[in-house]
Amino acid sequence: MQLLKRWRLTPSRAILEILMIAVALCYLIPIWMVFSNSLKDSTGAGLMGLSLPSKPVWDNYAIVFRESDILRGLYNGLLLGLITVVSNVVVASMCSFYLARIKRKISTFFYNYFIAGLIVPGSIIPIYLEMRILHLNNTYIGLVMLFVTATLPFGIFLFTGFIKTIPREIDEAAIIDGSNPYQLYFRIVFPLLKPVTITVSIFVFIAVWNNVAYYLYFSKSTQYPLPLSIYSFFGKYSQSWNLVFADILVGIIPCLILFMFAQKYMVSGITAGAVKG
């Protein structure tokens, strides 16, 4: 009752509520449009309306599974995503441990150098020429190297900030007990990084899963992940929008499942990792 008395609808609060609803609709309407049009025939989906069809066409999803080579796309996405996540977590966390603990000019320089990657965009042509010289175009290992390089600044930013919140006394106690640097890191420090490790893993996996440019420039169609199977139904001379929308929904399912299981760690990982970054 006291809570209801405290919450009164004032003009400023009403405007704020309307603004929040409008922002929420901006996010919800595209999702609803994709879902409703995925259940229509080709003609109905081409109109891009928001209404549900009178008779849902569930066969659209069966066609997507049958014609888009969905298993290959799932395999490519999971393979590249998981290898990139593991590589990123290992490299970024170990670099961050050094950058967070060593107070020297060289460590400050390298931290700023890595963080600059968050705002400096990558240039496709030099990367393409370098990949061609190294014979890494159209290879899985080349894609993994590209994705690890592109996501490393984000991982170092969060890991470094998080490690700075861990008391140095823990390091000193482990060293007094006889731990060498590798034992200190893998047995003592790394288990404490669980929240930020999960946060980095989720963002890196989604970045690899939803990337379009790198796959188009540096891979062949047989290496495309699930979201790029959309090109099976969207061409220069024909577009099956009902199948495109159905394919979009199928493509976001793995990321949605990953987010549902790990979202509780994301906020703590981002806030703890960003405070002292």
Image: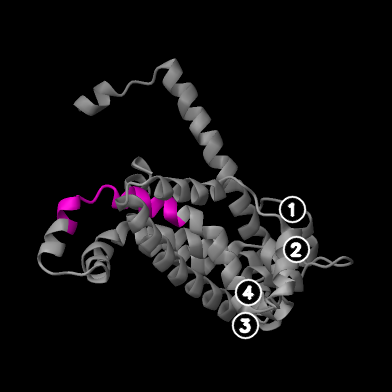
Bin the neighbour count of mark 4 within 10 Å (Cα to Cα): few under 14, some 14-19, many 20 and up. some
In the image, 190 versus 201, the foreground residue is: 190
CB under 8 Å between discs 2 and 1: yes
Disc 2 to disc 1, C-alpha distance: 9 Å
- Which residue is found at the position 47% from the left and 25% from the top? 16
Amino acid beneath label 3:
Arg
Residue 56 shows up from this direction: no
Is residue 35 left or right of 200 when viewed as pictured? right
Which numbered disc covers residue 48?
1
In the image, 85 versus 265, the foreground residue is: 85
Disc 4 to disc 1, C-alpha distance: 38 Å
In the image, 68 versus 242, the foreground residue is: 68
Q: Between disc 2 and disc 1, whose residue precedes?
A: 1
Q: Quadrant of residue 249?
A: bottom right
Q: Secondary structure at mark 2?
A: helix
Give the labeled residue for mark 2: 241
Is residue 226 magenta-colored?
no
- Which residue is found at the position 64% from the left and 57% from the top? 34
Which numbered disc covers residue 72?
3
Give the labeled residue for mark 4: 142
Disc 3 to disc 1, C-alpha distance: 29 Å
Disc 3 to disc 2, C-alpha distance: 22 Å
Image position of 85 with respect to 8: above or below: below
Q: Residue furthest top?
A: 11
Is residue 239 left or right of 85 when viewed as pictured? right
Q: Between disc 4 and disc 2, whose residue precedes?
A: 4
In the image, 266 versus 92, the foreground residue is: 92
Q: Between disc 4 and disc 1, whose residue precedes?
A: 1
Q: Secondary structure at mark 4?
A: helix
Please report the bounds of the magenta region as a residue range: 155-171
- Which residue is found at the position 46% from the left and 46% from the top? 109
